[in-house]
Image (cartoon, rainbow, N blue to C red):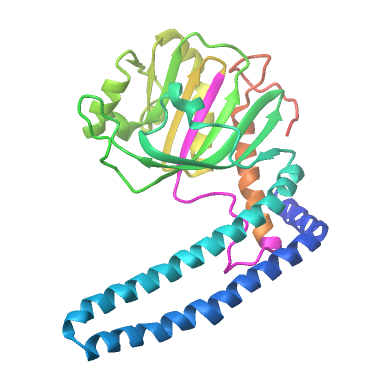
């Protein structure tokens, strides 16, 4: 769909969901009113009272007063976040099914993919905590697929020393796409960004993929961006034919990912596209749900559907060329 078509669809959904929109807006206003009448005045009045009282009596009480002030501010923040989370949960429950249905997709809170499903694909950085959020499933050219967003707290991918508590960054946000293949692969082939196969991270890669060979492809433009590892040279070159390499570069550009890993294993193709923020957020206390909010989520869904279409997979030719049939 083009942007104008998605905007028209967003207007239609907004009209059909007027009752839910009104209830959500009332809930949002009630939450904000509570924040403005109760929490903010309490914080503003409590700040000088605590500090003055602490300084008036004994200087020794001043640190206690500062600690009380910090506790008050933290309580305000957590109360606001809890109310916002409650509102967003209600908004997603009311709207995601409608948005998914309008795009020809199935929706499931918590997703259709578990991180355990991705474990044997070796495409995730190690993590201590994880959270899967909105998930969608559909079909294109008789090929089933699912995608969802998730976040993990990542740690170093090292096995020769225990760095499990050492994190590269506070959190890793990504989109996961799981696609059925038209044939069963006998071996395992992985694409990863070049920065993972050079310098410090090369130790982690070599240790984790000690059974994999480095596949030297002739497409220089592709080689500048990605490293291919596989347990079989012949099958890897079957998977990464010139057409597939072109599609993957276009896919990377379409998703705007800062971290792209792809695994071909068994009857599955799994894509992990690192993102800078969560997707499919339709509600926030400071942002009422309207046509533009709905359109933004529809655009995200359409981009993920387009990424599947872009790969041109179908059950009749395995990983081969597009057969020209229209699908979702």
Foreground residue, 163 or 248? 163
Residue at image position (29%, 28%) is 197
Q: Position of residue 281 (x, y in %)?
A: 58, 54
Residue 68, above or below 130: below
- Whether 51 is among the magenta residues is no
Image quadrant where one finds the N terminus: top right
Please determine whether, in this image, residue 175 is positioned above or below residue 93: above
Visible residue check, residue 24? yes
- Left or right side of 81 for 72: left
The secondary structure that dominates the magenta segment is loop
State the image coordinates of residue 215 (x, y, percent, origin top left): 36, 17
Residue 60, how many percent across, how many down? Answer: 17, 80
Residue 38: x %, y % from top left? 53, 79
Dividing the picture into quadrants, the one containing residue 51 is: bottom left
- Which residue is at 82% across, 57% downward? 16
In the depicted structure, whether residue 191 falls above or below residue 10? above
Q: Is residue 243 visible?
A: no
Boundaries of the magenta span = 268-292
Q: Is residue 112 above or below residue 234?
A: below
Residue 267 in the figure: left or right of residue 225:
right
Q: Nearer the viewer, residue 252 or 210?
A: 210
């Amino acid at each position: 769909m083009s942007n104008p078509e998605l905007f028209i669809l967003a207007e239609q959904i907004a009209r059909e969901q007027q009752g839910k929109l009104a209830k959500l807006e009332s809930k949002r206003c009630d939450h904000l009113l509570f924040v403005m009448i109760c929490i903010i005045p309490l914080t503003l009045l409590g700040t000088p009272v605590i500090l003055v009282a602490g300084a008036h009596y004994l200087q020794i009480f001043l640190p206690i007063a500062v600690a009380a002030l910090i506790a008050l501010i933290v309580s305000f923040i957590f109360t606001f976040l809890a109310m916002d989370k409650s509102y967003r949960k209600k908004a997603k429950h009311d709207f995601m099914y409608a948005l998914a249905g309008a795009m020809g997709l199935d929706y499931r809170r918590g997703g259709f993919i578990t991180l355990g499903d991705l474990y044997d694909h070796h495409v995730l950085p190690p993590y201590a905590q994880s959270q899967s959020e909105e998930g969608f499933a559909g079909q294109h050219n008789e090929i089933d697929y699912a995608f969802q967003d998730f976040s993990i707290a990542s740690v170093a991918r090292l096995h020769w020393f225990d760095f499990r508590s050492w994190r590269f960054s506070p959190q890793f946000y990504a989109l996961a796409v799981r696609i059925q293949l038209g044939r069963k692969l006998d071996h395992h082939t992985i694409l990863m960004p070049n920065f993972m196969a050079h310098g410090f991270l090369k130790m982690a890669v070599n240790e984790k993929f000690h059974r994999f060979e480095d596949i030297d492809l002739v497409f220089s433009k592709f080689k500048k961006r990605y490293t291919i590892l596989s347990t079989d040279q012949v099958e890897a070159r079957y998977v990464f034919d010139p057409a597939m390499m072109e599609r993957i570069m276009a896919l990377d550009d379409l998703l705007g990912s800062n971290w792209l890993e792809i695994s071909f294993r068994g009857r599955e193709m799994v894509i992990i596209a690192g993102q800078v923020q969560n997707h499919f957020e339709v509600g926030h206390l400071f942002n009422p749900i309207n046509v533009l909010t709905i359109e933004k989520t529809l655009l995200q869904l359409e981009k993920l559907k387009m990424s599947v279409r872009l790969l041109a997979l179908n059950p009749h030719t395995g990983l081969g060329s597009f057969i020209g049939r229209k699908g979702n």
